Amino acid sequence: EDHRPAHQSAPGKTMWKLFPLICLMAGADAYRAGAGVRPGSRVTSMRSAPVMSLDFDESKAMAGDPNAANYRKLSDALKEADVERRKEEEAAEAVMRAEEEKRLRRQKKIETMHAIPDDTPAGKVADFMYRDGVTEVLEQLDHDMIGLIPVKQRVRDIASLLVIDKMRRKLGLDTSIPSLHMCFTGAPGTGKTTVAMKMGQILQRMGYCRQGGVVVATRDDLVGQYVGHTAPKTKEMIKKAFGGILLIDEAYYLYNAANDKDYGQESIEILLNVMENQKDDLIVVLAGYKDRMDKFFSYIPGMSSRIGNHIDFPNYEPDELVEIAQVMARELEYEFAPDSLPVLREYIAKRMELPFFSNARTIRNAIDRARMRQANRLFEEKLAPTSNGNVSPEELKTFTVADMPTAAELIARGDSAIVE
């Protein structure tokens, strides 16, 4: 019985499969050579048989040898067995090399640890944060994004882990890449894409991804319309996002529980494989409403287990949305007249009660309407006969009460207000 490991099969294992055919051929050759061995009789030793070529001899086939076909089969079988044996030996050698390389890396790490004095400092956390640019990104996150205190804290937690891991590596201590795949849950307009971009910058500066860019995808970008179409589409999006983050918005649409033949399952399987085996090259972020994402994970438990960071984005409060409006206006080089802000807040509070409210996206739409109203107001005022037509810089950059959408307008429009 062969007690060697599975990857070290016996060199002669394949030969025993060929033994009956070899015996038959040896008996035929011996009989024709006058050795007294009749075909079908037992051959006690392969070496005692007359000379038998392991390669097919064309001259025998030309001479009408009845065993020519058997010679050909034997020659091909032996060549195939030799190829299989070489493949098995190469696989065994690869395993041994990998084990040896692992042992050498561990030995080198032990030697490095022994060589470092016990009082050697790893460095200051603030230095690592500043030098790698993490401090700058976190400050931008605080400055650019209003509210979202729990989200910002979770981003800081992840950044802290990455910084400490880098300090451990400096001293040669064992570190492992944490699961950086994420799930962002929350209503539209709560900043999920913006936070994903900031996370990409942090991970890129800390060396956990090469580019730090974010590629946004939906079901239409990943799932095909016919057989054989889904895999190329999914792989193409993965290729675009390699070295950075793939953000899949409304990821629950990938799976259709009502249709077993839906092509979305194929896309999910490809994503699961990449998330597990190529997590050093790609970070996947799934986004969508919390209740729907929870249901999606119940259908695809393997997806939930591969995600180590679940971050919930709460809806903004009215006062926070007013601040967001001021930030958006400032970026466009506008400002609000003091008496216009209470009108805007009243509008926001009423709009939040209506369907399809989208947090910061709704505010962006309100800012766009304010710009159009301001332009129309200035156009009419400066073309009036009583006006000299001159427009001051202050007028060009100021939103007044007359430019603001109002709660009274929402009430008057009723259900049609949901399109704004």
Image: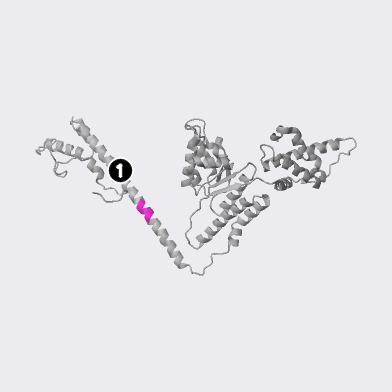
Q: Which residues are magenta?
A: 95-99
The local secondary structure at tag 1 comes to: helix
Task: Report crowding for label 1: few under 14, some 14 to 19, many 20 or more residues within 10 A (C-alpha).
Answer: some
Q: Is residue 98 above or below residue 39?
A: below
Please state the total of marks drawn on the protein image.
1
Let me know if residue 296 appears in the view: yes
Q: Nearer the viewer, residue 201 or 341?
A: 341
- Left or right side of 413 for 50: left
Query: What is the residue that sits farthest to the right in this orientation?
Result: 386
Let me know if residue 405 appears in the view: no
Q: Nearer the viewer, residue 113 or 345?
A: 345
In percent of the image, x 82 and y 37: which residue is there? 377
Looking at the rendered structure, the kind of residue marked 1 is: Glu
Q: Nearer the viewer, residue 372 or 253?
A: 253
Q: Quadrant of residue 286?
A: top right
Q: Which residue is mark 1?
A: 84
Q: Is residue 332 above or below residue 178?
A: above
Rendering coords of residue 404 (x, y %): 77, 40
Rendering coords of residue 160 (x, y %): 57, 57
Q: Quadrant of residue 22?
A: top left
Quarter holding the C terminus is top right
Rendering coords of residue 162 (x, y %): 54, 56
In percent of the image, x 43 and y 63: which residue is there? 110
Rendering coords of residue 405 (x, y %): 76, 39
The main secondary structure of the magenta stretch is helix
- Left or right side of 105 for 241: right
- Left or right side of 361 for 232: left
In percent of the image, x 48 and y 40: which residue is there? 270
* Residue 96 belongs to the span the image colors magenta: yes
